[in-house]
Amino acid sequence: MALLAGCSNDDFSDLTRYLSEVKAKPKEPIKPLPEIKVIEPFMFKPDGLRDPFKPLEQPEQAQGIDVSAGSGIKPDTSRRKEELEAFPLDGLRMVGTIDMKSSLWGLVKASDGTIYRVKVGNYVGKNYGKVIRIVSDKIELMEIVPDKPGTWREQPASIVLTE
C-alpha cells in the first residue's frame, strides 16, 4: 500500500490546460439527421415453389419415384458407373485431345486435378452424360435429366477446351 501511495501525483496542470483548450473552441452546429427513405414493402408468396432449406433429392435417391416408370427415355441404372460420373459437369475441364489408334480421345481434368481420357460412348457427370462427339475444341454430351417425377428428357451439354 505504501508503494501505491507514493505513486500519486497531485499535479493536474496539463489536464486542466487541455480542458480549457477544448472549452475555448467554438462549438459547431449539429448536423441534421438524414432523410429516411421510404421502402416499398414486398410480399413474398412461396406458393408452388420448392423449399430452399430442404436438400435436393438426387433422381436415383428420390423416394416414391420409380426410374422405370413412364415411357421413353430413362437412364441405365444397372450399369457400372465410370470414374468421371463422380464429378459434376461444371467441375470438369477439357484440356486437350489425343489421336490414338485412328480415334480421337478427349483429355478431361477433374476438380481433384486428375486428367482422364474419354472417348465416344463414355459417361461423364452426374446426369448420366454420354459422350456423343469429340472435336479438337470441345466434347459434346447428351445428358439424361429428370423432367417430372418418373419421367426423363435428353439435354445436350458440352465441355469446352480451356487450357
Image (spheres, rainbow, N blue to C red):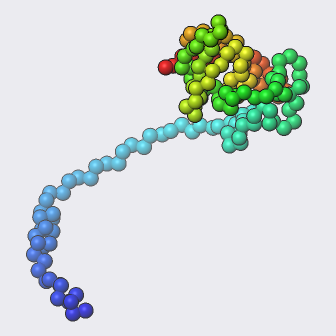
Residue drawn at (75%, 36%) of the image: 57
What x and y, as percent, mark residue 108?
59, 22
Residue pushed farthest front? 101
What x and y, as percent, mark residue 155?
71, 17
Q: 41 or 95: nearer the eye?
A: 95
Residue drawn at (18%, 57%) of the image: 27
- Residue 105, by quadrant, is top right
Is residue 19 left or right of 53 when viewed as pictured? Answer: left
What x and y, as percent, mark residue 5?
20, 89
Is residue 72 left or right of 114 when viewed as pictured? Answer: right
Question: Total label count?
Answer: 0
Q: 96 or 54: nearer the eye?
A: 96
Q: 95 or 75: nearer the eye?
A: 95
Q: Give the quadrant of the N terminus.
A: bottom left
What x and y, as percent, mark residue 113?
55, 31
Residue drawn at (83%, 18%) of the image: 73
In this rendering, the answer to whether 162 lies above or below 13 is: above
Residue pushed farthest bottom? 2
